[in-house]
Amino acid sequence: MAQAGPSTSSAPVNLPDENTIDESIFKTIWRDIVTIARNLRSVLIPINWNFNNNRDQALRNWDLWGPLIFMLWLATELSWGEKKASQVFSMVFAECAFGAVILTINVILLGGELVFFQALCLLGYCLFPICIAGVVCAAVSNKIARTVALALGITWAAFATVPFIGKAVPQGRKILAVYPVMLMYASIGWVALVKSRG
């Protein structure tokens, strides 16, 4: 009498597209570009459109490619033409990493939930307005125009941070969570303001 062996036919497992190992390189790169564009759109237009889906998804599905691009852009921009360029470059990276640690600890102490890499992703994407303000500061020598550009960039970055952090902290504690982030953006903006036009 033959015994039935273990069944070799099983139901197919449906894995998400992002976990497939056999996809083409082009498809992987394209997926990353779409993710960067989607997260950057949330920073460029920091309003509550599609609030529940888009903001939650951006914090849950964090990536580090976009923040890396914007940190490199800002660090290169601020260190260009400086006598101690390597120190300025590393200072921008260190400040963003330290800011992510502070943001994570602050959100946890306020009763919210945030992971370090989520915080780094959030801070990196919200650096984009400061990157644009840094370009204006590098191109313009007028102190008033530079100050206005940086004030707008810092305000825009802080305003873009609020909806993301608002989903991570309890209601009524958003300002306490955003305040240290604004201080970090202001200190990076100060470096861009005092940088000599090169």
Image (spheres, rainbow, N blue to C red):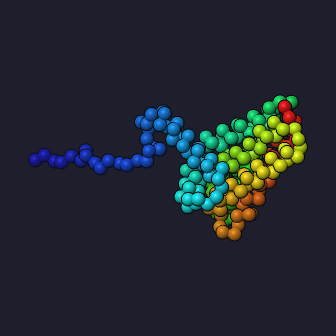
Question: Looking at the image, how many numbered discs can be counted on the residues?
Answer: 0
Q: Quick check: 179 left or right of 115?
A: right
Q: Quadrant of residue 161?
A: bottom right
Q: Nearer the viewer, residue 87 or 54?
A: 54
In the image, residue 165 above or below residue 134 = below
Q: Residue 66: give x, y in percent of width and height.
A: 63, 42
**Residue 172 in view of the camera:** yes
In the image, residue 175 above or below residue 73 = below
Q: Nearer the viewer, residue 34 or 85?
A: 34
Q: Residue 192: give x, y in percent of width and height.
A: 82, 42
Q: Residue furthest bottom?
A: 172
Q: Residue furthest right?
A: 143
Quadrant holding the C terminus: top right
Q: Residue 138: give x, y in percent of width and height.
A: 81, 37
Q: Quadrant of residue 195?
A: top right
What residue is at 66 percent from the left and 38 percent from the top? 69
Q: Quick check: 7 left or right of 51?
A: left
What residue is at 70 percent from the left and 40 percent from the top? 71
**Residue 168 in view of the camera:** no
Q: Residue 146: give x, y in percent of width and height.
A: 84, 44
Q: Residue furthest left?
A: 1
What residue is at 74 percent from the left and 42 percent from the top? 131
What residue is at 25 percent from the left and 44 percent from the top? 8
